[in-house]
Amino acid sequence: MDADFLNAFTQPAAVNQFLVENVITPGEKRKLIKPTSSNNPKLEQLKLLLIDWINTTLKEEHIVVKSLEEDLYDGLVLHHLLGSLKLDVDKIALTEKKQRQKLSVILEAVAKCLQLEESQLKWSVEAILAKDLLSTLHLLVAIAKHFQPSLAFPPNVHVETITIENTSKGLKTANGVEYITGSKENSEEQSTDDAFDELFSRAPERLDDVKKVFLQFVNQHVGKLGLNVKDMESQFADGVILLLLIGHLEGYFLNLRDFFLTPASTTEMLHNVNLALDLLTDGGLLNFSVNSEDIVKGDLKTTMRVLYCLYSKYKAKET
């Protein structure tokens, strides 16, 4: 077990509780809310809002939900919430096999109703069945936004997460921050996401032009540090240039002891990228969820979305 895994928890008791309550099978990868976020007031507010919405919606059916983790995993409550959709499932599923089958039908119907591709889903049958709170929250927020768009969600609800993967060499972990609800200005963020999706899927011929704009912006600033970026996918993967760019633009010095200037492993690269994302979040520049592993793997779309957070603020100041 590596040190990052232990450092993700603040008390030994939390580690023991996690190991007792969660089994990560070989080859499995799971993202969980850190215990340090469990008492987040905004998170509690969101949970209470969702519970109240469910109980109000299902009042005439005499269904009362007290716990999102314990009361939704078998599909019964979800089935009733989606009453307007005609689903061919058993009303009550008592065995795990039946519950898995029922959840599969329900979640497939949700994805179809919300017009979501598989890559956009932040939940799964196994996660809901395992009473995973993060997946359950993402699912309920998506359903509520579709069926009751007037519901006033608390803005910017986010949690610290740990992604755990059981590999042949042991447990591999990565820390991150995940947003469950967006800001009140989330329509602007959504339009940005849509713009990048549109760029990559329907206007790839313009991609090089957009990359040149970002590279010009980046080099204009990191050039003052004696650096030059030519390849966005590879040169941002270790987080070093991103950190130096943030520090330069935001006007603060990054202690060399806080990050790896010459990262020698994926773990060190993830540390750098996670630190950069934390700085952007704390500075109010990043208000959507980013998988740090995507940047480390050189995912261009994710890298460009993160850079846009800086570009949109500082390019506007230059003009």
Image (cartoon, helix red, strand yellow):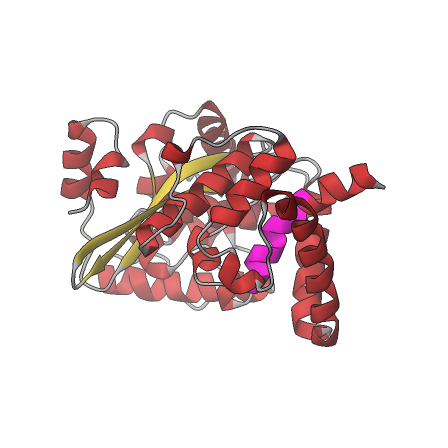
For the residue pair 92 and 238, the one nearer the viewer reads as: 238
Residue 272: x, y in percent? Answer: 42, 44
The furthest residue to the bottom = 205
- Image check: 254 left or right of 225? left
For the residue pair 192 and 319, the one nearer the viewer reads as: 319
- Image check: 193 left or right of 297? right
**Is residue 152 among the parts visible in the rendering?**
no
Please say if 176 is above or below 89: above
Please say if 159 is above or below 215: above
- Image check: 244 left or right of 47? right
The furthest residue to the front = 226
Please say if 19 is above or below 49: below
Residue 97: x, y in percent? Answer: 24, 65
- Image check: 172 left or right of 263? left
Magenta part, dominant SS: helix
The furthest residue to the right = 319
Q: Residue at x 44, y 27 (%)?
A: 44
User: Which quarter of the figure has residue 127?
Assistant: bottom left
Residue 124: x, y in percent? Answer: 39, 59
Please check the rendered image and state whether residue 279 is part of the magenta-colored stretch, yes or no.
Answer: no
**Is residue 222 among the parts visible in the rendering?**
yes
Quadrant where the image shows the C terminus? top right
Q: Residue at x 46, y 52 (%)?
A: 291
Q: Which residues are magenta?
A: 299-310
Q: Residue at x 75, y 67 (%)?
A: 209
